[in-house]
Amino acid sequence: VKYVVKCNSKGSEIMDIILYVSGVLVLIVSITLIFFISKGERVVNLVYKFNMCEKEIIEFLNNKESLILRVIGIIERELKSEFKVFEDVKNIKVSKPSPYEKDKLLTSAFEEITKIYTDNPNLKEIKSFDGIIKDINKNEIKLISLRTLYNKCAMEFNSICNKFPYKVICKFKKFKERTLYEGKELNDEEMIEYYSKLVNEYGGKLTAKWVYGMVIYDGKETNEYSWSKGHFYFIDKPC
């Protein structure tokens, strides 16, 4: 009888140790998961932001391409000459450059258009030409704003994606470093000026709200979620 009791006592001790170790392991795994989830939210939010920016950038680049091609057509028709400097832009649908390359190509083409426009005063008399130039400038303001926001998010992402634990998260989700756009960006003063003009177009005061986004990827499909909170005002005159 004594022998049986002794065995039961040892068995109980072993079970206690197993339970203790299991509890510690569960705790460690839980803390690790919470840690990676919290860090993962930062990465996912940055990716969501610059992906949304890039979608809009591509849209405005396509619009810029269309406008520039129209301008090139007017220039060559009015000046009765073809310009080799515009060949790459004319073949853009065939070459299919990346958004970054397309941005550089269109920016370079517009610089050439501006020079031709300045050197040929008779072009200013063509209303359609002048109107398209204004549309390109308006489009460019949108692009500059989007480019600034995209590069800001992409730079923050690039600065952490090769550091622990973000490197593990990025590798798991197959996120890679982003290429930055090389065109003009807005500094703080220019951002204030841009939004002041935007608000002025809508009467000098706008009701705004913060909109947040999250993307969840389970290895098979991506689900996007967004929510908002906190209303505030935009006014056209900085305080």
Image (cartoon, helix red, strand yellow):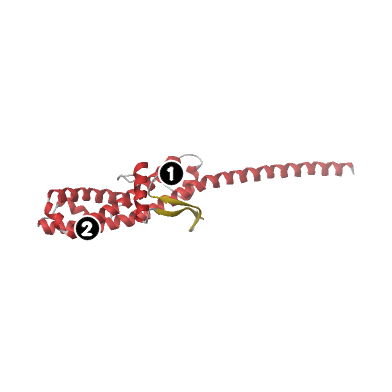
Per the image, label 2 sits on a secondary structure element best described as helix
Judging depth in this view, the residue of 201 and 80 nearest the camera is: 201
Can residue 187 be seen by looking at this rendering? no
Q: Taking 152 as reference, is 86 left or right?
A: left
Crowdedness near tag 2: few (<14), some (14–19) or many (≥20) residues, C-alpha within 10 Å: few
Q: Position of residue 157 (x, y in %)?
A: 43, 44
Using the image, determine if residue 158 lies above or below residue 138: above
Q: Disc 2 residue type?
A: Gly
Q: Position of residue 90 (x, y in %)?
A: 20, 56
Occupied quadrant, residue 71: bottom left
Q: Quadrant of the C terminus?
A: top left
Q: Residue, x 22% and y 57% (percent of image)?
A: 132
Residue that lies at the very extreme toward the right in this rendered image: 1
As drawn, the residue found furthest toward the left would be 80
Mark 1 sits on what residue?
Answer: 157
Type of amino acid at the residue the image marks with label 1: Phe
Q: Is residue 91 left or right of residue 185?
A: left
Q: Left or right: where does residue 106 sit relative to residue 176?
A: left
- Residue 106 appears in the picture as rendered: yes
Q: Nearer the viewer, residue 5 or 193?
A: 193
Q: Is residue 123 left or right of residue 148?
A: left
**Residue 58 rendering spot, x and y as whole percentages:** 33, 55
Label 1 packing within 10 angstroms: few (<14), some (14-19), many (20+): many
Whole-Å distance between the Cαs marked 1 and 2? 39 Å
Q: Residue at x 55, y 47 (%)?
A: 37
Q: Nearer the viewer, mark 1 or mark 2?
A: 2
Looking at marks 1 and 2 on the same chain, the residue that comes earlier in the sequence is marked by: 2
